[in-house]
Image (cartoon, rainbow, N blue to C red):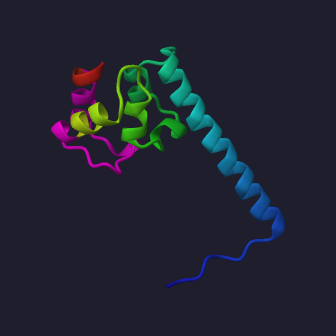
Amino acid sequence: MATPPTLTPEQRAAALEKAKEARAARADIKARLKMGSLSLKSALESDDNNVGKLKVKSLLESLPGVGKVKAAKVMDEIGIADNRRIQGLGTQQRQALLDALG
């Protein structure tokens, strides 16, 4: 197994800050979905890299009225794996999600 690259303390701090900003951006997206200020359709059509990095399960659970059970059921019916991210969805899977929950 290859060893990870050695980073200087400045590079490590920069990487940690970048990861912190990405987590905050994804949390903001989920909060906007929960409040209803961002729709499922606009999230799926977004070209924002932070939306693309979200797991489908996490995005669906952020929607109002959709919990863990309903999200898992919808994903299972469509055929989306639990570990799939938004950027990995095909157009038919995106449309099926919109038809089921949009």
- Left or right: 43, with 17 as reference point: left
Q: Position of residue 77 (x, y in %)?
A: 16, 37
> Can residue 87 be found in the magenta stretch?
yes
- Above or below for 13 versus 40: below
- Above or below for 38 versus 26: above
In percent of the image, x 61 and y 76: which residue is there? 4
Q: Residue furthest right?
A: 10
Q: Quick one: 64 or 97, which is closer to the camera?
A: 64
Q: Position of residue 34 (x, y in %)?
A: 49, 22
* Prevailing secondary structure of the magenta residues: helix
Q: Residue furthest bottom?
A: 1
Q: Quadrant of residue 11?
A: bottom right
In percent of the image, x 29 and y 35: which residue is there? 69
Magenta region: which residues?
Answer: 76-98
- Left or right: 13, with 29 as reference point: right
In percent of the image, x 39 and y 45: which residue is there? 85
- Above or below for 41 versus 61: above
Q: Position of residue 18 (x, y in %)?
A: 69, 49
